Every structure is written in C-alpha cells, then in structure tokens.
C-alpha cells in the first residue's frame, strides 16, 4: 500500500491508517523505514512482533569487527539492508 506521509514519529498510508514509532528509538525507526523501503505492511508486521513477542531491532555492521562482538545473526530475522550493514529482528 502506498505511503502518503512520512513524519519523524509515524507513517500514514493512503487510507489514513497510521503506524507510530512508539518505543522504537528514532535512529532505529529511520533504519527500519530505509530497510523496508517504506513498505507499510512489512513495518506493521515488524511492529506487531516488537509489541507482542518482545522482539527488538538490531543494526548489524559486519565490516566493523568491534560492533560485531557477541552478535550471532543465525537466530535473527533479516529485515533488510541498511548502509554498510543490515537490520535484523531479534
């Protein structure tokens, strides 16, 4: 479904439905928008998993070894690509 408005704290589709950022930190919210290419349905599904299943977003940068310590992507769900890395749901 096409996106009508993109604001700092929410997305609105052409039907007037809104997804708010809620407790997602602003930097991860922006990465989520980028990684999903503003796909309203995908963002809605991910938000449900965060709210209902206690999942969280994790930005992974494989080219920076210091940031990869203790991160195992084998048990994470890939959300999408971001600059220099990927966004996962853990």
Image: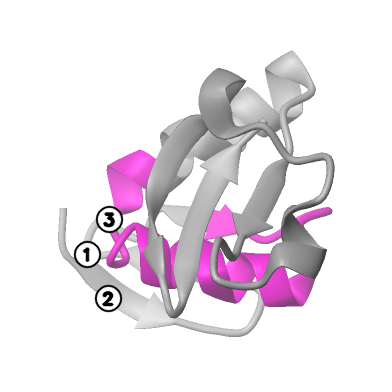
Badge 1 is on which residue?
14
Q: Which of marks 2 and 3 is nearer the N terminus?
A: 2
Can residue 42 be seen here? The reply is yes
Q: Quadrant of residue 79?
A: top left
Query: Which residue of the protein is positioned furthest toward the left in this rendering?
Result: 1
Q: Residue placed at 55% from the left, 71% from the top?
A: 63
Q: What element carries label 2?
A: strand
- Find out whether the residues at labels 2 and 3 contact each other: C-beta distance under 8 Å: no
Badge 3 is on which residue?
39
Quadrant (top left/top right/bottom left/bottom right) for the C terminus: top right
Q: Residue placed at 59% from the left, 19% from the top?
A: 75
Side of 75 relative to 69 (left or right): left
Q: In which quarter of the image is residue 31?
A: bottom right
Name the residue nearer the viewer: 77 or 53. Answer: 77
- Find out whether the residues at labels 1 and 2 contact each other: C-beta distance under 8 Å: yes
Residue 58 percent coordinates (x, y) = 68, 50
Residue 4: mark? 2
- Find out whether the residues at labels 1 and 3 contact each other: C-beta distance under 8 Å: no
Q: What stretch is highlighted in magenta?
A: 19-42
**In the picture shown, does residue 51 fall above or below 30?**
above
Residue 37 percent coordinates (x, y) = 28, 66
Q: Quadrant of residue 22?
A: bottom right
Q: How crowded is mark 2: few (under 14 residues within 10 Å), some or many (20 or more)?
A: few
Q: Is residue 89 magenta?
A: no
């Amino acid at each position: 479904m096409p996106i009508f408005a993109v604001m700092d704290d929410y997305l609105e589709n052409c039907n007037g439905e809104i997804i708010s950022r809620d407790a997602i930190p602003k930097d991860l919210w922006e990465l989520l928008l980028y990684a999903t290419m503003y796909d309203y349905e995908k963002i809605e599904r991910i938000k449900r998993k965060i709210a209902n299943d206690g999942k969280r977003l994790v930005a992974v940068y494989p080219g920076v070894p210091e940031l990869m310590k203790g991160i195992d992507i084998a048990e994470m769900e890939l959300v999408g690509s971001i600059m220099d890395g990927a966004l996962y749901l853990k």
